[in-house]
Amino acid sequence: MTWHFETDPEFQKQLDWIDDFVREEIEPLDFIITSPYDLTDPVRNEIIKPLQQQVQERELWACHLGPDLGGPGYGQVKLALMNEILGRARCAPTVFGTQAPDTGNSEILAHFGTPEQKEQFLEPLLRNEIVSCYSMTEPQGGADPKVFQTTAIQDGDEWIISGEKWFSSNARYSTFLIVMVVTDPDNPPYQQQSMFLVPTDTSGVEIVRNVGLGYESETDDHGSHAYVRYNNVRVPKENLLGPRGGGFIVAQTRLGGGRIHHAMRTSGRVQRIFDMMCERAISRTTQGELLSKKQMVQEMIADSWLEMEMFRLFVLRTAWRIDKYQDYKKVRKDISGVKAAMPGVYRNIATRALQIHGSLGVSWEMPFTREVMESFHMGLADGPTEVHKVQVARRVLDDYVPCDDLFPSSHLPKKREAALTKYADVLERHLETQ
Ligand SMILES: Cc1cc2nc3c(=O)[nH]c(=O)nc-3n(C[C@H](O)[C@H](O)[C@H](O)COP(=O)(O)OP(=O)(O)OC[C@H]3O[C@@H](n4cnc5c(N)ncnc54)[C@H](O)[C@@H]3O)c2cc1C
């Protein structure tokens, strides 16, 4: 049995390099690059491309991919340790070739794509020469994909896509969109939809508006979550991705890895917020003593550390289980659990850090309001927390069997009676000698 919590020294050297590199070269970029996804931004390209080159030379590029796709094929545990460092800086995943949603999109292209689709879409995506978008959620419903209304109708050698999608992140920067649409309305609910690859410049693809998050300024036009309308968009039949009616299967393949990678990065992000909270607690004085001397502040630090450590270990154990079983289905409960736990831990720690910083904490001179909002992002993107909790509960309950007796199997009188029966001989002998 192996059960240890150590990183092998060779890989630790890589992690140390990544840590310095992210701190020195990438963290400052968050102040000067508007979006790491905007390939038309000359500042972004001048700075990011040489950094990506360094990462490639170090053989740390796209570490989520196997050697067949140009990655080193690191397992999820190594990836988790790397990703928690990358989580510290917004541009870091792009510099290391592991940015969402391109990671998930490349996963499904690698899994389901035809050789031609891989050549046209996957290869340039893996080199970050293009950016992709995953266009699934609709204005009338996201958590329940069964209510999607965007359709595709076959017309000779083409499909015609019509409908609307909501919160399609990075559509404005993308070269292609992966769109989930109803192709077979008469099939059972989970076999009605299919995935299509749609080049973003196809006639009829209309970005109605780019929506930003609450902390972003509407006037800056930096919103990156698009409301997209598909006005009779024609794509060749070769652009069907995966089996017809297999949209749900493709979507599941995409989300397995993506969810755990978000959690790994969140672990690093939370550590950074926690560091800020601790620094403030031992630096700021009120009523003649440091904040860190106040018991309620101590409670905030202790609770935050406990939540952070428990979450980190949960993420790492889930990563370890993915590596061990090599089958996402066997680890679904863990992945949903990590996904469900993530926003709460993030939000609690960001909120406490904000509070400890007082008025400075709510101001735009510290990152906490953004971090609190981001914690809500983590509780929505890739499915709301509630839906994941339902998954966890279902899978937990699968391991139990009902008790057909009127009283539960652990009813104490029943257990006592069983114990008395089991040890009746011994008890009888001792009674006789008394
Ligand atoms: C920052 C960000 C980026 C995103 N990027 C993308 C993207 O690139 N592509 C894409 O397709 N989508 C994207 N999404 C959309 C995301 O997938 C949806 O927000 C999510 O699926 C929830 O759908 P909804 O927003 O329509 O909420 P609804 O489906 O309206 O749900 C609203 C709320 O209802 C509750 N609820 C829902 N279902 C249940 C349930 N079963 N039990 C109990 N309560 C429930 C939850 O509290 C939930 O938050 C993104 C979202 C965010 C926030």
Image (cartoon, grey):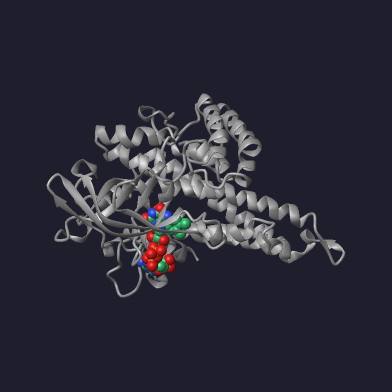
- Percent position of residue 326, x then y: 35, 39
Q: Quadrant of the N terminus?
A: top left
Residue at horizontal 26%, vertical 59%? Answer: 150
Q: Residue furthest right?
A: 288
- Name the outermost residue toward the top: 57
What residue sits 52% from the left and 56% below the top?
221
Q: Relative to 229, does residue 15 appear above or below in the rendering?
A: above
Q: How many numbered marks are there?
A: 0
Residue 162: x %, y % from top left: 25, 58
Whether residue 81 is visible to the viewer of this picture, yes or no, is no
Along the viewing direction, whichever of 303 and 5 lies nearer the viewer = 303
Residue 70 at x, y = what percent? 40, 28
Residue 400 x/y as whole percent: 33, 60
- Does residue 95 lie above or below 369 as drawn? above
Ligand 1's image quarter is bottom left
Q: Which quarter of the figure has residue 62?
A: top left
Foreground residue, 1 or 262?
262
Residue 48 vertical placement versus 166 (above, below): above
In this view of the protein, can residue 226 be seen by the observer?
Answer: yes
